[in-house]
DNA sequence: TCTGGGGTCCTAGGACCC
DNA sequence: TCTGGGGTCCTAGGACCC
């Protein structure tokens, strides 16, 4: 059996090009641009990379480059990207070659192929890649190997060596050779901190890491890093479950113009809470706690800084918008300090559990039932006529 | 002028229990 | 001098991911 990993190339930018043919061949960036020209580059295609642009740069720093190279700036459209991602999921599942297919993130998928012959695997994966390209227009890099982590390494090679044509199958006898060419920082699960520690131990490549004695890894690192180590050595360790239910739900925003006024901030927080409540109901869950946070602008050392958060428990757990909005507003009242310029705020729901009906049974009253129906109707209206067609005053 | 928005899991330590 | 020996649950913060 082989593990399969599929990674969409420059996903947000590819979605824009796929749905807007007039963009083909042009440098394209996707940015969360706001009405004041703020925002940062979230994704960019190869043409945009070629003119020196990079992910994460604020647009205002590269205005000249954008203009000189006639770069198309697309506004980020998460709904579209979610829709295309679901389509990829459906197409691959319907094709039936891949087993245990999971949507790991909006642009990455894992699965297994019940075959051991690398040549057959390669042909299958090329077919899958072609299927995705034909049905959605999205280019992908695909990797196959003995574990999830090694499959991700294979994808790295598929994307970085043109000869693979986007598909790299890494059989056991090629493992060591491949890992010797892979920098430790390019391994899935090795972040900045762990990389620093490993480098101090003389580890530069993924192969160096696998040559450490296992007990040394156990003593020095946490279990997540140990799992990465075992997987690189060829032992499947990581379990992926397709978690359709989120365990936390957050809505936050960096304001284009800083907010000082309490009522303005409060109305933003209320909107975040309402949107969180909607996602919560969409997945059929209730939550046990609400957190609100506020931040000033960390880039402005000329301004007084303040950041804080506060959490409230909800008993019984709920998905009722008015309750969540009122709770969030009460928390904001605790947090708010006059005289600061607020740049960012957000609402987080945690303690999420499934099946609202079951949780409420014991104390459900007629009033609760009416509230549930009200939520149901507002959700339906907003789905049918667009977000925030109906909001809470 | 302008600087993203989400998630997950693990671990240490505190509060509390017997 | 020395101050038991288990547990559970919760939370904050770190690290990592896209």
Image: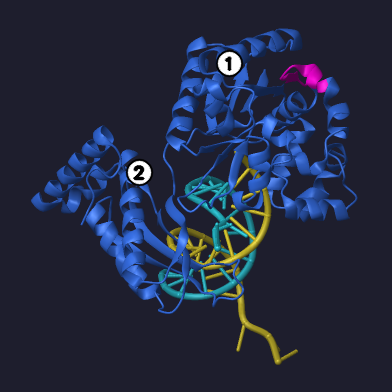
Chain colours: A blue, B cyan, C yellow
**Mark 1 in CB contact with mark 2 (< 8 angstroms):** no
The tag earlier along the polypeptide, 1 or 2, is 1
- Residue identifier under label 1: A133
Residue farthest to the left, as pictured: A366
- Indicate the quadrant containing the C terminus of chain A: top left, top right, bottom left or bottom right: bottom left
Q: As rendered, which of A329 and A370 lies closer to the eye? A: A329
The residue sitting at 55% across, 76% down in the picture is A303
Mark 1 or 2, closer to the camera: 1
The residue sitting at 28% across, 50% down in the picture is A319
Quarter of image, res A80: top left
- Indicate the quadrant containing the N terminus of chain A: top left, top right, bottom left or bottom right: top right
The residues colored magenta run: A162-172
- Residue identifier under label 2: A279
Instruction: Provide the chain ID for the residue under circle 1.
Output: A
Vertical side of A120 occupied by A76: above or below: below
Give the image location of residue A315, x and y in percent. Answer: 27, 60
Q: Is residue A171 magenta?
A: yes
Q: What's the mark number on residue A266? A: none
Q: As rendered, which of A219 and A366 lies closer to the eye? A: A366
- Residue A225 can be seen in this image: yes
Give the image location of residue A91, x and y in percent. Answer: 49, 15
The span from disc 1 to disc 2 (Cα, nearest Å) is: 30 Å
The residue sitting at 88% across, 41% down in the picture is A208
């Amino acid at each position: 059996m082989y593990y399969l990993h599929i990674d969409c190339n420059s996903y947000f930018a590819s979605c824009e090009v796929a749905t807007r043919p007039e963009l083909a061949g042009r440098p394209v960036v996707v940015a969360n641009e706001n009405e004041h020209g703020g925002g940062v580059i979230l994704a960019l295609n190869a043409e945009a990379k070629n003119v020196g642009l990079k992910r994460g740069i604020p647009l205002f720093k590269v205005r000249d480059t954008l203009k000189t190279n006639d770069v198309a700036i697309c506004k980020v459209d998460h709904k579209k990207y979610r829709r295309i991602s679901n389509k990829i999921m459906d197409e691959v599942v319907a094709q039936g070659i891949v087993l245990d297919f999971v949507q790991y993130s909006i642009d990455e998928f894992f699965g297994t192929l019940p075959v051991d012959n690398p040549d057959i695997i390669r042909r299958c994966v090329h077919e899958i890649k072609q299927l995705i390209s034909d049905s959605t227009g999205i280019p992908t890099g695909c990797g196959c190997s003995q574990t999830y982590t090694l499959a991700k390494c294979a994808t790295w090679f598929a994307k970085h060596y043109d000869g693979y044509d986007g598909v790299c199958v890494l059989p056991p006898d090629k493992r060591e050779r491949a890992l010797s060419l892979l920098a430790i920082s390019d391994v899935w699960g090795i972040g900045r901190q762990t990389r620093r520690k490993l480098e101090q131990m003389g580890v530069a490549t993924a192969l160096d890491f696998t040559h450490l004695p296992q007990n040394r890894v156990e003593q020095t690192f946490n279990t997540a890093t140990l799992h990465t180590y075992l997987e690189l050595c060829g032992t499947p360790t990581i379990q992926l479950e397709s978690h359709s239910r989120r365990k936390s739900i957050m809505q936050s925003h960096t304001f284009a113009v800083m907010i000082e006024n309490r009522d303005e901030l409060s109305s933003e927080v209320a909107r975040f809470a309402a949107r969180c409540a909607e996602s919560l109901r969409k997945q059929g869950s209730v939550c046990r706690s609400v957190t609100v946070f506020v931040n000033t602008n960390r880039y402005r050392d000329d301004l007084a800084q303040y950041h804080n958060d506060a959490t409230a428990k909800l008993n019984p757990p709920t998905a009722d918008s008015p309750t969540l909005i009122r709770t969030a507003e009460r928390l904001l009242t605790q947090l708010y300090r006059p005289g600061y310029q607020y740049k960012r705020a957000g609402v987080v729901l945690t303690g999420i559990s499934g099946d609202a009906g079951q949780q409420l049974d014991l104390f459900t009253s007629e009033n609760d039932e009416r509230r549930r129906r009200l939520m149901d109707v507002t959700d339906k209206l907003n789905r049918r006529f667009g977000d925030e067609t109906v909001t809470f005053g």
